[in-house]
């Protein structure tokens, strides 16, 4: 009986550590590929049109400062400084390998988005509420960048000795912040909703792949 329980526990552990991340990785990649094909290449705009219609009520002067603040949290200016602070903190905690790895992940995400934008060459929505941007739209770099960074923070929190209550509270905060960064890009008309969802799916795939490889290396 004890042997059977031990085997069951090992099977469940293997599922959560390897099989489940693999499933989410594949689903994230499939979602990105589907959006890239159907929405970007085939130019199906129903989803984007409905998203703009849904968020139109928030495109007034009262809300713009709030969404501008959230969009800053996904900007390269913020993320560069935030990554530097995170890496220094990890070095102080004697976790140099994690710090270097997270820094490389952030750079890899930025470079990948840059070349994907050039490859898809999708123009941004018209009539942005703030200063117009000249680069391409798909996928959203803010979505990829914020998901990677706040995903890393979430992972680090769950590896720490912080109480479970605070782990869940900070997880909700980080997930909510990431989602609001994406919403801000739609409300401010810097991105189509498909750019944002595509960015989130790509960022999630990259994060899962990195953490999986990190776990394998540590094991």
Image (cartoon, rainbow, N blue to C red):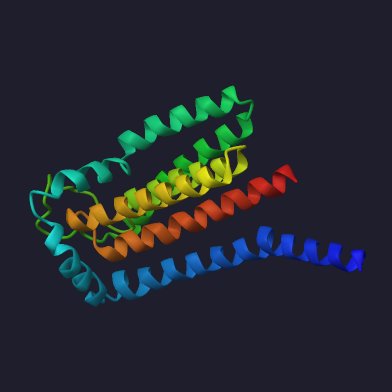
As rendered, which of 107 and 17 lies closer to the eye?
A: 17
Residue 11 in percent (x, y) is at 77, 65
Q: Quadrant of residue 122?
A: bottom left
**Horizontal placement of 130 versus 135: left or right?**
left
Q: Quadrant of residue 157?
A: top right
The correct choice, above or below, for 15 with respect to 156 in the image is below
Q: Residue at x 67, y 48 (%)?
A: 215
Camera sees residue 136: no
Residue 83 in percent (x, y) is at 44, 33
Q: Residue at x 41, y 73 (%)?
A: 34
The correct choice, above or below, for 18 with respect to 71 in the image is below
Q: Residue at x 42, y 66 (%)?
A: 32
As rendered, which of 45 and 14 lies closer to the eye?
A: 14
Q: Residue at x 37, y 37 (%)?
A: 79
The correct choice, above or below, for 201 with respect to 30 in the image is above
Camera sees residue 70: yes
As rendered, which of 7 and 144 lies closer to the eye?
A: 7
**Horizontal placement of 87 versus 215: left or right?**
left
Quadrant for the N terminus, please.
Answer: bottom right
**Horizontal placement of 47 versus 218: left or right?**
left
Q: Quadrant of residue 60?
A: bottom left
Residue 139 in percent (x, y) is at 34, 57
The correct choice, above or below, for 80 with respect to 41 in the image is above
Residue 126 in percent (x, y) is at 12, 59
Q: How many numbered dots are placed on residues in this image? A: 0
């Amino acid at each position: 009986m004890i042997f059977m329980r031990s085997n069951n526990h090992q099977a469940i552990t293997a599922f959560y550590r390897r099989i489940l991340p693999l499933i989410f990785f594949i689903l994230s990649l499939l979602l990105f590929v589907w959006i890239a094909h159907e929405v970007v290449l085939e130019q199906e705009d129903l989803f984007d049109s409905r998203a703009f219609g849904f968020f139109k009520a928030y495109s007034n002067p009262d809300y713009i400062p709030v969404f501008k603040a959230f969009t800053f949290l996904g900007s390269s200016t913020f993320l560069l400084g935030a990554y530097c602070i995170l890496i220094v903190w990890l070095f102080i905690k004697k976790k140099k390998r994690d710090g270097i790895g997270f820094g490389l992940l952030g750079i890899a995400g930025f470079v990948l988005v840059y070349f994907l934008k050039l490859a898809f060459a999708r123009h941004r929505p018209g009539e942005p509420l703030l200063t117009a941007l000249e680069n391409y739209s798909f996928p959203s770099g803010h979505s990829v960048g914020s998901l990677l960074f706040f995903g890393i923070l979430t992972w680090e929190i769950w590896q720490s000795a912080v109480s479970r209550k605070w782990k869940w509270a900070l997880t909700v905060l980080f997930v909510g912040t990431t989602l609001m960064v994406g919403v801000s890009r739609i409300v401010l008309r810097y991105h189509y909703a498909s750019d944002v969802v595509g960015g989130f799916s790509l960022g999630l795939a990259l994060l899962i792949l990195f953490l999986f490889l990190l776990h394998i290396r540590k094991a």
